[in-house]
């Protein structure tokens, strides 16, 4: 029985943020061995998508996600209001979840309504669609340790099926409190890109993608010293091999990138630089 080959898609506007590599320009240089980690680490970003009051109240997860989302849209030269989006996070906001559990256990009447509405997993995508006036489809995805791969697959399928660009945003933040005993998330990391059905002047690489069973459990490891420092930072570190490849101007002969989706399935990526 024959199988259908997914169509080639195109990547635009890669965006990256972590305190030691605050922005895609810094990350791309470091992944190439041409730049150093930021010292001291950068403070959390202040996304201009939000009004000043909202910007001050937004938790780290929202600030991170919106910063890379805006950078990806700008890099792709797209109108944020028109682009469907997929936001993916393994945990959402662990700090707020810890606060809510602690407050509910000790003094429930003191629970902050603002923190309560920021606790939901789709808070970041909600802020994004409101701030940009986006009425296109929006999704919030979680697949625990495989959340980046699941979000990328969701965005690729949506792009291929609807023949429209899709914004992908991935982000996670540190574990705090009692949750540190059950999950390990050590810092801030967010990534974003736009996946398009056709090549444009803003295309940075073509993307061939497929599902495979033989590579599951053996994810592609980061190669550069800069990326290696981040490989255990939080679940979004799974995105590092893809962003390293984008920084290095990938060729058709390069080894594929395998991102596990489960114990039995992986998303296989093959990139080739545009032009």
Image: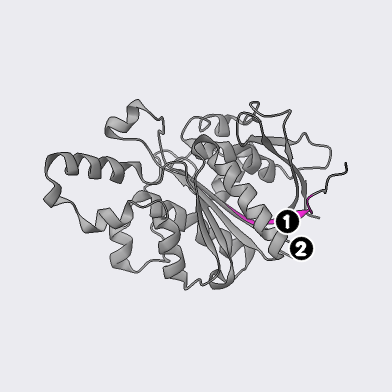
Membership of 159 in magenta stretch: no
SS type, badge 1:
strand
Whole-percent x, y for residue 122 in the image: 42, 55
Membership of 8 in magenta stretch: yes
Task: Check the picture and name the quadrant holding the N terminus.
Answer: top right
Whole-percent x, y for residue 126 in the image: 42, 62
The overriding secondary structure of the stretch rendered in magenta is strand
Write down the quadrant of residue 117 in the picture.
Answer: bottom left
From which residue to which does the magenta span run?
A: 6-16
Q: CA distance from mark 2 to mark 1?
A: 6 Å
Cβ atoms at labels 2 and 1 below 8 Å apart: yes
Residue found 32% across the figure and 55% down from its top? 118
Which residue lies under the disc numbered 1?
10
Relative to 7, 236 lies left or right: left
Whole-percent x, y for residue 222 in the image: 62, 31
Instruction: Give whichever of discs 2 and 1 has the lower sequence position.
Output: 1
Relative to 220, 272 lies left or right: right
Crowd band around label 1 with a 10 angstrom C-alpha radius: few (<14), some (14–19), many (20+): many
Which residue lies under the disc numbered 2?
198
Q: Is residue 217 above or below residue 64?
A: above
Q: How many marks?
A: 2
Residue found 18% across the figure and 51% down from its top? 111
Write down the quadrant of residue 130 in the picture.
Answer: bottom left
Asked whether residue 165 appears in the rendered view, the answer is yes
Task: Check the picture and name the quadrant holding the C terminus.
Answer: bottom right
Furthest toward the right, the residue is 1
């Amino acid at each position: 029985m024959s199988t259908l080959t997914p169509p080639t898609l195109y990547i635009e506007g890669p965006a990256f943020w972590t305190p030691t590599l605050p922005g895609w320009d810094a990350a791309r240089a470091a992944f190439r061995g041409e730049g150093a980690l930021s010292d001291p680490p950068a403070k959390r970003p202040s996304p201009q998508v939000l009004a000043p009051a909202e910007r001050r109240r937004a938790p780290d997860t929202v600030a991170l996600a919106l910063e890379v989302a805006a950078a990806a849209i700008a890099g792709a030269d797209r109108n944020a209001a028109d682009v469907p989006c997929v936001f993916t996070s393994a945990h959402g906001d662990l700090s707020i979840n810890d606060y809510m559990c602690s407050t509910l256990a000790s003094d429930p009447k003191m629970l902050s309504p603002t923190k309560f509405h920021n606790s939901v997993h789709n808070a970041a995508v909600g802020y994004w669609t409101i701030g940009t006036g986006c009425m296109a489809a929006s999704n919030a995805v979680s697949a625990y340790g495989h959340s980046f791969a699941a979000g990328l697959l969701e965005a690729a399928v949506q792009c291929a099926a609807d023949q429209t660009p899709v914004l992908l945003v991935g982000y996670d933040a540190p574990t705090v409190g009692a949750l540190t005993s059950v999950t390990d998330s050590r810092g801030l990391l967010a990534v974003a890109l736009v996946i398009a059905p056709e090549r444009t002047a803003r295309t940075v690489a073509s993307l061939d993608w497929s599902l495979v069973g033989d590579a599951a459990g053996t994810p592609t490891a980061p190669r550069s010293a800069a990326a290696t420092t981040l490989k255990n930072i939080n679940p979004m570190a799974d995105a590092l091999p893809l962003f390293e490849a984008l920084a290095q101007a990938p060729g058709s002969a390069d080894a594929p990138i395998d991102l596990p989706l489960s114990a039995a399935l992986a998303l296989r990526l093959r990139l080739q630089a545009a032009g």
